[in-house]
Image: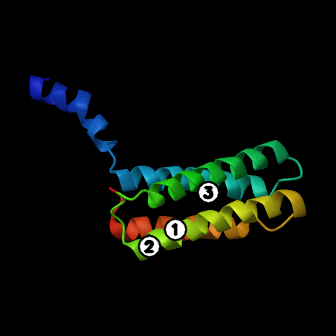
Amino acid sequence: MTALAQAVAAYGQAQDHIRTPRGTEYDAIARITRALTSTSKERDTRFRDFVAALYANRRLWTHLAAAVADKDNSLDPDLRAKLFYLAEFTETHTRKVLNDGADPDVLVEINSAIMRGLIAEGTQ
């Protein structure tokens, strides 16, 4: 094996995993959304996992809210306001899911819409 082939073999795979910030956001949202989806259907038997998924989702949206509230954020102000509203809605609805048994599917729908938007902008 030549030195070039060895270098490609050693470093080529690492290059495949380099992500853009949007790609990283997509991966985080997708991971949390999968956890919400899988645990919500079995929340009676996997309640601890369900609560952990809700908590992770709430933390994600708290982080997104802080990011869009930053005066140096370069997103369009209208989009920033919409994302901040979604963060507030997610906080409120998560409380309703836990306290009143509200349907968590709307949280999955919101995350899925955000993921579609990230794909449209190019996550790689």
Q: Determine the CA span between mark 2 and mark 1.
A: 6 Å
Q: Nearer the viewer, residue 95 or 105?
A: 95
Whether residue 2 is visible to the viewer of this picture, yes or no, is: no
| Residue at the farthest front position | 71
For residue 33, the mark is: 3
Quarter in which the C terminus is drawn: bottom left
**Does residue 82 appear to the left or right of 6 in the view shown?**
right
Q: Residues within 10 Å of mark 1 (few under 14, many from 20)?
A: some
Q: Nearer the viewer, mark 3 or mark 1?
A: 1
Instruction: Please tell me how crowded label 2 is: few (under 14), some (14-19), or many (20+) other residues with Cα within 10 Å.
Output: few
Which of the numbered marks, if any, corresponds to residue 79? 2
Contact, mark 2 vs mark 1 (Cβ under 8 Å): yes
- Element at badge 3? helix
Q: What element does badge 1 sit on?
A: helix
55 vs 121, left or right, is right
Identify the residue at horizontal 49%, vertical 64% (top origin). 115
Q: Nearer the viewer, residue 45 or 84?
A: 84
Rendered location of residue 50, percent (x, y): 77, 49
Q: Residue at the location (73% across, 64% down)?
A: 92
* Residue 71 found in image quarter: bottom left
Relative vertical location of residue 14 with respect to residue 102 in this rendering, above or below: above
State left or right for residue 54 relative to residue 71: right
- Amino acid carrying mark 2 in the image: Leu
Residue count near mark 3 (Cα–Cα under 10 Å), binned few <14, some 14–19, many ≥20: many
Q: Residue at x 40, y 72 (%)?
A: 77
Q: CA distance from mark 2 to mark 3?
A: 21 Å
Q: Position of residue 83 (x, y in %)?
A: 52, 68
- Residue holding disc 1: 83
